[in-house]
Image (tube, helix red, strand yellow):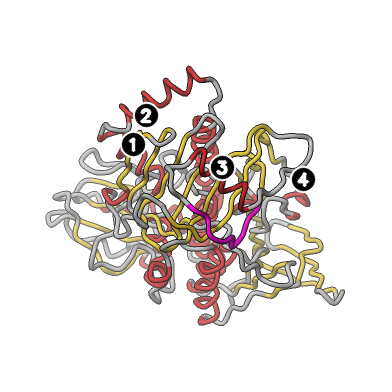
Amino acid sequence: MTDPVLVVGAGPVGLTAALELSRYGVPVRVVDAMTERATTSRAVAIWPRTLELLERAGGGLSAELVSRGNKVTFGNILAGRSPLARVALSDVETPYPFVLMLPQSETETVLLEHLDARGVRPELGVALDDFVEDGEDVAVTLRHADGREETARYGALVACDGAHSPVRHRLGLSFEGDTLASDWAQGDFHLSGMPFPVNEFATCLHEDGPAVLFPLAPGRYRVIVGLGPSTAEAPSVPTMAEFQALLDRRGPGGIVLQDTIWTTSFRINERQVERYRVGRVFLAGDAAHVHSPAGGQGMNTGMQDAINLAWKLTLVLRGLATSPFLLDSYDRERRAVGAEVIATSGRLTRMATLKNPVARHIRNAVMHFVLGLAPVQHALEGALTETAIHYADSPLNGVSWEAGPRAGARMLPVEGEPAYGAGDTPRFTLRAGATAGPPPADLPGRLVDAVVRPNKVAGGIELIRPDGYLAMAVAGGEWERIADYLRRLVAA
């Protein structure tokens, strides 16, 4: 029987980890110290790459999320009330050419429904009190809300327990980085007078600080504003009248806030854990990395952490692959992605909060020119939508044939085909050109989908990971190199 996995944290990252593991046949338990689920919106953006990866779970998960949210296809950048640039997300090659605006509470509701269909129900009011990892499994002590203590053993522990992660603290891992010396506030409002349609968001740059407006639905917007340099005390939350005054000064004009749904204030931390894995304990989401909300990458990055980990952990726990570098690759791949997200969101934040008038003038002039160039627009679109994420330095990368994409690259989903990694076992996918020849009979079948899909590169053979990234590519007839790669995953 497959060893069960304990997921600590029932937010979107923990729910995604549980959903992926359970659909792959791994027994999973989800616990969270919170006694009731939050109903506020919090994270609101789901980017195309996340929707592509969630599609693999089946059951129409991505389609259901899309049906509940607002599809935003353009982003506007203004300086005061003057337009600087317009970014078209609809140009991205993906089945989901938009950013989906959906309150986190609704995202969690959909994930919970799909988990429930698999017989997994998160347990609230259950806290991880202690654990001991011995390299093979994890012994845990859980404390229930009524004070009852429980002990159990699990094949792995996945910590999705937030920025103040007790698991990270218990492991003694450093969480290095900085707290930016500026205060921020955000809120959801019903408003009128927005000059852009509901499929467009706006970032307004101003000498006092930025104001960003994301459309959640017609007449309902997420508003984020910079409040200026931090003081010694925690930032206070502006009133609706104060939010209105900030938008009047910084926004595109004509916007009238009508009522408040939810507001909060915060300071930006840019931090990353030194290791994402300690034996059979894994960190994901805010437990592993926190950063500026600029770009809306936080929840998505965490959910993709969970997806990256789940197929690898499944192969090991189900005894389908035993190579040590399979689990090692989780830290190597996702820590690099986390570092890049921290760097990119930090640059966006610093660019938006320039105080020097000369620097602001140069920024505005450069942005107006550079963001009008197609290559720059495509690069920005790829970074925002997370379709540009790749694992160029992964230990899982095999060779790259000169005629096709490089190992570690995202492979574009093909319309009409099953998603890479769909089904109840995380299998690799083969694509082969018409003249590539047949695969050998001794190919490790338990790791590879039985159907060889056509390859656009004549004669070439591609091996694609269960999460849709290229593992390796060879010329036609070089099936033995594919077989050697798969045997190395199987072998200890």
Distance (Cα) linking label 2 and label 4: 43 Å
Are the residues at dot 3 and dot 4 in contact (C-beta closer than 8 Å)?
A: no
- Name the residue type under label 2: Met
The residue that label 1 is drawn on is 85
Residue topped by disc 3: 246
Q: Earlier in the sequence, mark 2 or mark 1?
A: 1
296, 489: nearer the viewer? 296
User: What residue is shown with label 4?
Assistant: 172
Estimate how packed mark 1 is, as few (under 14), some (14 to 19) or many (20 or more) residues with alpha carbons within 10 Å.
many
Q: Earlier in the sequence, mark 3 or mark 4?
A: 4
Q: For the residue carrying disc 2, how many other residues have a C-alpha within 10 Å: few (<14), some (14-19), or many (20+)? A: some
**CA distance separating discs 3 and 2:** 23 Å
483 or 403: nearer the viewer = 403
The answer to whether residue 106 is left or right of residue 452 is right
**Label 4 is placed on what type of residue?**
Gly
Query: Which comes before the other along the chain, label 2 or label 4?
Result: 4
For the residues labelled 1 and 3, the Cα–Cα distance comes to 22 Å
Residue 19 place in picture, x, y as percent: 52, 70
Dividing the picture into quadrants, the one containing residue 364 is top left
Is residue 314 visible to the viewer in this orientation of the structure? yes
Location of mark 2 (residue): 367
Spatial CA distance of label 3 from label 4 is 42 Å
Q: Is residue 270 above or below residue 148?
A: above
Quarter of the image with the N terminus in it: bottom right
Residues under labels 2 and 1: Cα distance?
A: 7 Å
The stretch of residues the image draws in magenta is: 256-264
Callout in the foreground (3, 4): 3
Q: Nearer the viewer, mark 2 or mark 4?
A: 2
Q: Amino acid at mark 1?
A: Ala
